[in-house]
Amino acid sequence: MKRWMWTTLWLYVIGCDPGEPLGPLTARRSAVTCGEGTYRVGAGRADITGPLVQVSTGYNAPGEVAEGLGMRLYSRAFVVESPCDGSRVALVTAEMVHLYESIKPGVLAELRALGLGEVYTDQNLLLSATHAHAAPSNLSWYTLFNLANGTVGFDRLHYRLVVSGIARSIQQAHQDLKPATIKLVRGEVQGAAFNRSPWAHGNNLDGEGIEGVNRQMVLLRFDGLDGQEIGLINWFGLHGTSLGIKNHLVHGDNKGYAAYQTERARGGGFVAAFAQAEMGDVSPNQPDPNPENRYFLRANDRDRRLSEIENPIVDGQKQWLAAQALLAQEGETLRGALAYRHSFVDFNRIERIEPRYVRPHAMPWDEPEQARTGVACVGAGFLAGDEEGAPVDFAREGEMKNAFVLEDGRYRKVPYRFENTASLVRALGALWPIAKLVLGTDAYAEVHKEKVVLLPVGQVERFWPFNPGIPFVETITPLQLVVLGQLAIAAVPFEVTTMEARRIKDRLATALAPAGISEVVLATMANSYSMYLTTREEYAEQHFEGAFTLFGPWSGAATEQELDRLAQDFLAGRDPAPGPNPPDLSAKQLVETWVSRTGVIRDGGNFGEVLTDARERYVRDETVQVVFRGAHPRTVFQRLADASAGNAAGQGAPTFLEVQRRGEDGAYQTVADDGDPLTTLRWKRVGGPVSPLSEVTIQWILRDVPPGTYRIYHGLAKRLLASDLPFTGTSRPFEVADR
């Protein structure tokens, strides 16, 4: 029988009219008949832990370089297939600091190599980052994100490991599809989130009486009809800054711990994705009770008994407990359409933003009919840093901005003067006239209003010889709308503040109500990275978030307009305008990190030798420490990448450490490894920068550890010339007692 005949027969059997066009609204009505709330769902998880050392940390801070491993990083994927028309969408959450614009094209290329290129495209693949600032960077194709780093340049090995791992998680989910139900549950996460920019939030015209954070977690639970739990994905907005800027260990931060703990508690291959929502001004850290300090306190600041590496545990536990409580609820069964709309938008050049998106929130000196976006520019206000320890802190936050004063019935702009700043920024005052001329900042001053334009990063690079003809950042931005039954997911590449997210979701909820949408979530850090998105009123304050709202004061209104356009396309059953394709810059990365170009030159010494052994006895709450003669860990990752070149079939890196407990029969069993939140591995080169000698320090914090005899086991692989040289190192057995 011909394929179309089988398709026609199947549609009649499940209740769909094969002659009726399956536009979004039709698909939604038919899917209820097709599956009575049944989809096909698959889940996958894959390791994306890249090089542990000599790569930049996620704070993009000069001089701050990763030195080891706290917890491994993962990509978690869910594939959902419509029971009616077979359409699919893949929802992926990766433990990364940013979902750089380079990642999605790389993943799609890997999927094509796996034979899935016709199944997953830009339109139905939603990639998002958890925004873990302890995850390493050096992954962007654009200069800005690879320049302001601890290590300058692009890391090709790290890139290959990340994109292949993400593709591998999608492949697993694709292969694991089975009939399932999807339940939607909502609930609050108590005591987890704090607004880190309350002054800017308080400037919102509609903000009176509205709390500065959204504490609601929206969770989807996937259950197989065979009785097996598949997994969950939830959206809750919270910065991945439980670990501070001085942390040098690769880690998934609070969302990484929440996922780890959930998967360990549920067992059975359960996949738990803790995705990112509106968190542009939301911190896991608590405000210092001394308002003069203005900084936020992490868990180990508030409780000196804690190690810094335990901060993600404290903050992640709140999300894990909330997810556990929501999993226990019945929830609302999703029924209906599976649809998606996607478009690229050149945010540099949105020439008109309709007044209805502008007027309710305009400042007195604005002209709503003239609202548009501008060339992406970083404002001088970022030099004041933020409340969580950004790598700059040269002025008071909100001080560096242009003012507007009313004179003779008209508003006049009063430009900011650097020489009025009592800090190192004053030095810029003398250089600023020359810098403005070189950078051409005056050309962008009008559209950026209160922002003191410091770096026009969206213009074509004129003075950077390595990547001529491209901007410093991506300006062609992806926007995406995914509809799954009663749920709509709006995906944006920004760090969106609480109030701007509220406006976006309210507008989409109103627009999509005729389609039966009862919940709208905002998936941030999705498909690319375009810095911050604030409201017009927050932008006027020019705090850290406003200074990094790249496209000007109406960036938020422009995003509302463009997402509303996708919603109208969905309602009308039409494809959106695809927009301009971002350039493929994979072959133009002339500036790579030093270690990316050279690899590991040489390691030496008696690999695995114990340099500092464990004590014979410890009690709970102490820390075990063992130092080994090691090797550069990058070699292991290079071998992995070489083994899986051209496909995503490889596995994650081997375990770098194990903690083993002796049983009654004298045999040792592994009870913890390098994925455990209480173990750490630190690497350092000793004997100078050209020395071949490495030391690896392993620590294990003893919290709630059963009494017994343990040992620390360290294993690595080292390539010496053309051959592989496996080696191990083992500490002496040590006793752990209650006290």
Image (cartoon, grey):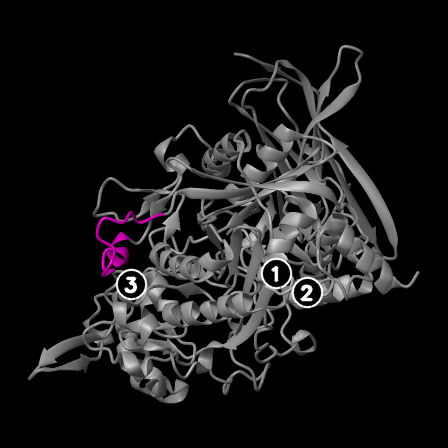
Residue 158: image x %, image y %? 67, 59
Q: Can you say whether 188 is above or below 573 in the image? A: above
Q: Can you say whether 325 is above or below 121 in the image? A: above
Identify the residue position indicated by label 1 in the image: 26
Q: Residue at x 55, y 60 (%)?
A: 526
Residue nearest the observer in this picture, 382 or 327: 327
**Secondary structure found at label 1:** helix
Q: Which mark is residue 20?
A: 2
Q: Can you say whether 468 is above or below 269 in the image? A: below
Identify the residue position indicated by label 3 in the image: 538
Which of the marked residues, 3 or 2, is nearer the chain's N terminus? 2
Residue 222: image x %, image y %? 64, 40
Answer whether labels 2 and 1 touch (C-beta < 8 Å): yes
**Segment colored magenta:** 198-213
Which of the marked residues, 2 or 1, is nearer the chain's N terminus? 2
Label 3 environment density (alpha carbons within 10 Å; few <14, some 14–19, many ≥20) = many
Check if residue 40 falls in the magenta segment.
no
Quarter of the image that includes the N terminus? bottom right
